[in-house]
Image (tube, grey):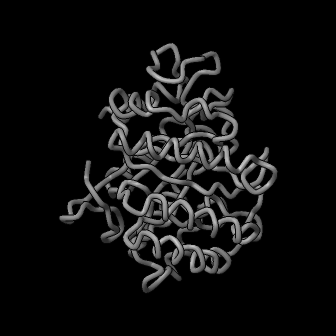
Amino acid sequence: MYGALHVEGTSLASADGTPVQLRGASTHGLAWFPQYVNSAAFRTLRDDWHANCVRLALYTAEYDGYCEGGDQAKLKALVRSGVDAATDLGLYVIIDWHVLHDLTPLTYIDQAEAFFDEMSAAYADNPNVLYEICNEPNGDTSWADVKSYAEQVIPIIHHNAPDAIVIVGTPEWSQRVDSAAADPLTGEVGKNVLYSLHFYAATHGEWLRERMVQALDAGLPIFISEFGTPDASGAGANDFASANAWLDLADERNVSYCCWSLSNKDEAASLLAPTSTATSGWTDADLSETGAWYRERLAR
């Protein structure tokens, strides 16, 4: 829709400098819910939901993740299938290296380097592909750890795709954008980089929105690459008042975002009801409470 993107100021822009906001949905773990990685599903998101972006969540560790017992060939084929489907539909697509239970992205940096080398070489000519190199660093992981990792992985991506957009996670499950704002990536490594902030509406309120505003005001480009409407566990009651406050702010500041998750997992954060068996063309009956809210929200 907007052609090749670049980072300008604190958000994305088209080639002519027009501000661009990506709004879309994230898959759940590709190994667990592969059925939603299909062209018809993505077409439904585009045509019925008015989304312009899909995020492909490739877990690195838990439950047969890519680096801990998963079928790497099958998982890479799923990523490629998702990228190709999104590309054919004119959607932007995020390849997400979903660090979570492995705590720090440095745990599997060798595998990350090989993976992003392969993917960025394959999609070097695809201006719609964005690379999220570490989902949610957590535990004792510091911003210095994440920055060190980024300084090793980003040059590999930019060697193959010099103008590619890269999204870098921040510590404490991608909440510490203040740490990144105080010491951002610089030079060629910092070119076309955004920093991720994640929120779950029932857990993360005004205090984290204030942190985002302060980081934006300091000049940090931010992408909300994952958010949910319930608490941080993905369960509990949905807090749509908080979620609307978040997205109102994101829309006002031209911050892009993707909602977790395109799946029928039996949890409040899922966009589809656990009773739904449809993998595209979802009716009202297929949608969860969150899915019905988000579909209406995107139509505004």
Residue 278: quarter of image: top right
Mark count: 0
Task: Specify whether residue 231 is in view.
Answer: yes
Direction from residue 33 to residue 6 in the image, left or right: left
Image position of 295 with respect to 10: above or below: above
Expressed as whole percent of the image width and height from the top left, the position of residue 235 reads: 68, 35
Residue 116: quarter of image: bottom right
Q: Quadrant of the C terminus?
A: top left
Residue farthest left in this picture:
16
Expressed as whole percent of the image width and height from the top left, the position of residue 138 reads: 71, 63
Residue farthest top in this picture:
285
Expressed as whole percent of the image width and height from the top left, the position of residue 268 reads: 63, 31
Residue farthest bottom in this picture:
187
Task: Specify whether residue 242 is in view.
Answer: no
Query: Closest to the observer: 9 or 239?
Result: 9
Which residue is found at the position 42% from the left and 63% from the top? 124
Direction from residue 118 to residue 12 in the image, left or right: left
Image position of 39 with respect to 248: above or below: above
Direction from residue 195 to residue 173 in the image, left or right: right
Residue 12: quarter of image: bottom left
Expressed as whole percent of the image width and height from the top left, the position of residue 142 reads: 69, 75
Which residue is found at the position 34% from the left and 68% from the top? 7
Which residue is found at the position 69% from the left and 36% from the top? 32
Query: Closest to the observer: 251 or 33?
Result: 33
